[in-house]
Amino acid sequence: MVLIKTIVFIIVSYLVGSISFAYFICRKFYATDIRQYGSGNPGSTNVLRVLGTKPALIVFMADLLKGLITVSIGRLVGGENLALLSAVAVVVGHDWSIFLNFKGGKGIATSFGVIIGLFPKVAPVLLIIGISVIYISRYVSLGSISSAIMLPILLILFKYPVKHIIFGLILGIIAVYRHRDNLERLLAGKENKLGQKVRR
């Protein structure tokens, strides 16, 4: 019974993660398929470049809450282990959405929501790191990658259990993998900086 409950909740978490708020909000309220503009990525950074600050903030907060609520319910339903498993599932759902032909965003907002729910002491440190790197470099992707790399390191420094460190490593690897195109552009000096608009 416990196994069935775990499997069901993981599937539900994946489906919740698969809900693309960037796609839905842009299509519903701005008559825009965000996948057809900018980087083509249905995430808050691309929404910012294409449509501006307000819709980007709405998308970011919706994706963040998607992660936070999922892991919070997972903990209530099945404890810390289910919370960790559901956290991976909701991020995977966001990154490879079943509703978008297994394509999706890069999972940073959803991952941050997950981190707030699981590691409230680590979350503000990661936020400061990410914002600092973005402020200095003007590259959102570099801030995201830096935070992803720092996650398992901070979990070690804050003396979290091994299972949490392994989870942080998995989440970090997923985030870096999803930013592999950004890494190539960063190395080539072709990455868009924060504030650069995209013509519609």
Image (spheres, rainbow, N blue to C red):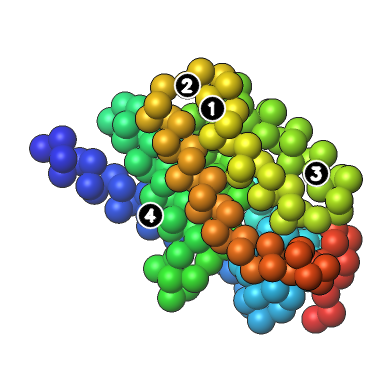
Query: What amino acid is at disc 4?
Result: Tyr
**Where is mark 3, residue-wise?**
133
Please tell me whether mark 1 sits on a helix, a strand or a loop.
helix
- How far apart are labels 4 and 2 at the CA level? 25 Å
Label whose residue precedes the other's in the sequence (4 or 3): 4
Query: What amino acid is at disc 2?
Result: Tyr
Label whose residue precedes the other's in the sequence (1 or 2): 1
Query: What amino acid is at disc 1?
Result: Leu
**Where is mark 1, residue-wise?**
155
Q: Residues within 10 Å of mark 2 (few under 14, many from 20)?
A: few
- How far apart are labels 1 and 2 at the CA level? 5 Å
Please tell me whether mark 2 sits on a helix, a strand or a loop.
loop
Identify the residue shown where x is 74% and y is 52%. Answer: 142
One can see residue 76 in this view: no
Image coordinates of residue 91 in percent, x first then y, are 47, 51
Which of 11 and 190 lies nearest the eye of the viewer?
Answer: 190
Query: What amino acid is at disc 3?
Result: Val
**Where is mark 2, residue-wise?**
160
The mark lying in front, picked from 4 and 2, is: 2
Question: 67 above or below 140?
Answer: above
Residue 103 circle label: none
Please tell me whether mark 3 sits on a helix, a strand or a loop.
helix
Image coordinates of residue 125 in percent, x first then y, are 69, 28
Question: 87 above or below 162?
Answer: below
- How far apart are labels 4 and 1 at the CA level? 24 Å
**Where is mark 4, residue-wise?**
14
Question: 39 above or below 57?
Answer: below
